[in-house]
Image (cartoon, rainbow, N blue to C red):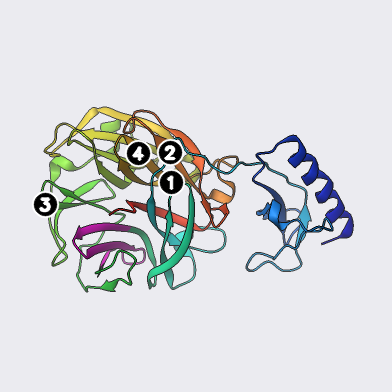
C-alpha cells in the first residue's frame, strides 16, 4: 500500500478512535478497476501496526488492487438478548448470483454464544449446485439436513448422528419444484414447507415427502400482493403453541434488493391454517432463518442495507416479544461482517 495512504489511514483511524471509543472497524474500498466493481475490505483496530501502516491481504481473485478511502464506521453488535445460536448456511465466494458460484457448493456451520458474533466455521456437506440448507433435529443423536439442488430444482436429504456432521446423503428422491425448505415437528408429525409456499407431510426416518397440505399453503394474494411469490419459509413454534412463518416476498421480476421479509401466524395451535389478518411486513431483505428462545426471536437474513451489512452480509432482526417488533443488527464471523454466507438456518445451541 502507498506510504501516503498508510499515513492518511493512520491519521483518520486515530482521529476516529479518539472521537468514538466504540469504533469496531473501518473499511477500505478495493478494486481491480478504478471506476467499477468496488468491494469493501473490513479493517479492525488490530490491523493497525505500531508504525501506522496496515497490512492488507488482497481478497480472493483480486490482483493489482487499487484503493480508495471509503471509510465506514460500525460498532460491534450488542444485542438486547443473549441467545446461543448455531447457524447453518450456504457459502459462496465472489460477486454475482450466489447460486451460480463455482462447484462444489459448501454447506457450513458457525456458532455464537450471543447470537451476533460467530466463530468455529466448519463444512458439514458439499456437492454441486447446493443452496438453501435447512437443518433440523429429528430426535436424540439424530439430525436432518434438507438442501435445494439448484440445477435440478428439488431437495436432497442428508442425515447425521451429531449436529456438527458430517452429513451423509440418504439418496431420498423428491418431486421437482420442491425447493427452499423449512422443516418443523408440528405436534408429533414433521412437515416440510417449501417455496410457493407449499406444505407437505414428511417422514424424516425414510425421507419420504407426503402429499401437499393445501390449507398450509400461502400465496402472494393472501398477503395483499397482486403478483410475485412467497418463498424461503422459516417456521417457529410460539410460546402459546401457535406457529409463526417468516418468509420472503419477491415481486415479479424484482431484484434481490426489492425482496421483502414478512411473517404470518397460524390460526391456532393445530397449525392447520394461517391467519391472513396477522400477515405483516418486517423489513427489506432475503431468505430468513428464525429461531425462538423464550420470548426472544432472532431472525437471520441477507441484508442489502450498506450501513447495516456491507457487501450484502448477514444481519439479524431481534425481537423480545416473539416477533411483534424487531430491531436490526449486523452479524459478524471471526470479527468481520458475515459476508459470503447465504440462506441461514438457525438452531439454538442447546438443540
**Can you say whether 101 is above or below 351 in the image?**
below
Label 2, secondary structure: give it.
strand
Mark 1–mark 4 Cα distance, whole angstroms, equals 13 Å
Q: In the shown orientation, is residue 116 left or right of residue 173?
A: right
Which residue in the structure is indicated by mark 3? 189
Magenta-drawn segment: 134-159
Q: Earlier in the sequence, mark 2 or mark 4?
A: 4
**Can you say whether 154 is above or below 240 in the image?**
below
Q: Are marks 2 and 4 in contact (CB under 8 Å)?
A: yes
Tell me, for residue 297, which label it has, or none.
4
Residue 231 picture location, percent across and down: 32, 46
**Can you say whether 7 is above or below 123 in the image?**
above
Residue at x-position 30% and y-position 46%: 234
Closest to the camera, between mark 2 and mark 4, is 4
Tell me, for residue 301, which label it has, or none.
1
Residue 245 picture location, percent across and down: 27, 40
Q: Earlier in the sequence, mark 3 or mark 1?
A: 3
How would you rate the neighbour count of disc 3 (Cα within 10 Å): few for under 14, some for 14-19, many for 20 or more?
few
Magenta stretch: helix, strand or loop mostly: strand
Residue 269 picture location, percent across and down: 13, 36
Q: Earlier in the sequence, mark 1 or mark 2?
A: 1
Mark 3–mark 4 Cα distance, whole angstroms, equals 23 Å
The C terminus appears in which quarter of the rendering?
bottom left
Q: Is residue 36 magenta?
A: no
How would you rate the neighbour count of disc 2 (Cα within 10 Å): few for under 14, some for 14-19, many for 20 or more?
many
Q: Are marks 1 and 2 in contact (CB under 8 Å)?
A: yes
Q: Is residue 37 visible?
A: yes
Q: Are marks 2 and 3 in contact (CB under 8 Å)?
A: no
Q: In the shown orientation, is residue 317 left or right of residue 205?
A: right
Label 1, secondary structure: give it.
strand
The quarter of the displayed image where residue 129 is located: bottom left
Amino acid at each position: 500500500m502507498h506510504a501516503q495512504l498508510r499515513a492518511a489511514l493512520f491519521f483518520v483511524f486515530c482521529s476516529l478512535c479518539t472521537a468514538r471509543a466504540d469504533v469496531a472497524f473501518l473499511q477500505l474500498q478495493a478494486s481491480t478497476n478504478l471506476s467499477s466493481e468496488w468491494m469493501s475490505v473490513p479493517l479492525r483496530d488490530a490491523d493497525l501496526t505500531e508504525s501506522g501502516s496496515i497490512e492488507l491481504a488482497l481478497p480472493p481473485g483480486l490482483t493489482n488492487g487499487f484503493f480508495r478511502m471509503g471509510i465506514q464506521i460500525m460498532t460491534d453488535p450488542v444485542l438486547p438478548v443473549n441467545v446461543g445460536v448455531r447457524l447453518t448456511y450456504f457459502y459462496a465466494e465472489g460477486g454475482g448470483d450466489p447460486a451460480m458460484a463455482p462447484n462444489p457448493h459448501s454447506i457450513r456451520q458457525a456458532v455464537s454464544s450471543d447470537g451476533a458474533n460467530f466463530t468455529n466455521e466448519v463444512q458439514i456437506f458439499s456437492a454441486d449446485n447446493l443452496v438453501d440448507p435447512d437443518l433440523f433435529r429429528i430426535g436424540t443423536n439424530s439430525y436432518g439436513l434438507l438442501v435445494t439442488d439448484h440445477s435440478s430444482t428439488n431437495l436432497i436429504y442428508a442425515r447425521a448422528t451429531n449436529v456438527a456432521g458430517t452429513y451423509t446423503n440418504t439418496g431420498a428422491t423428491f418431486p421437482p419444484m420442491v425447493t427452499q425448505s423449512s422443516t418443523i415437528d408440528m405436534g408429533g408429525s414433521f412437515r416440510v414447507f417449501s417455496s410457493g409456499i407449499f406444505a407437505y407431510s414428511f417422514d424424516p426416518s425414510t425421507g419420504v415427502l407426503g402429499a401437499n397440505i393445501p390449507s398450509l399453503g400461502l400465496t402472494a394474494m393472501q398477503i395483499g400482493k397482486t403478483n410475485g411469490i412467497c418463498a424461503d419459509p422459516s417456521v417457529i413454534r410460539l410460546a402459546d403453541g401457535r406457529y409463526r412463518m417468516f418468509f420472503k416476498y419477491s415481486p415479479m421480476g424484482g431484484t434481490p434488493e426489492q425482496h421483502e421479509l414478512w411473517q404470518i401466524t397460524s390460526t391456532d395451535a393445530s397449525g392447520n391454517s394461517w391467519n391472513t389478518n396477522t400477515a405483516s411486513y418486517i423489513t427489506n431483505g432475503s431468505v430468513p432463518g428464525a429461531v425462538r428462545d423464550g420470548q426472544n426471536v432472532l431472525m437471520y437474513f441477507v441484508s442489502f442495507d450498506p450501513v447495516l451489512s456491507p457487501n450484502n452480509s448477514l444481519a439479524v432482526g431481534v425481537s423480545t416479544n416473539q416477533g411483534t417488533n424487531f430491531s436490526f443488527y449486523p452479524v459478524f464471523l471471526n470479527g468481520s461482517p458475515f459476508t459470503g454466507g447465504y440462506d441461514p438456518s438457525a438452531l439454538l445451541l442447546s438443540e
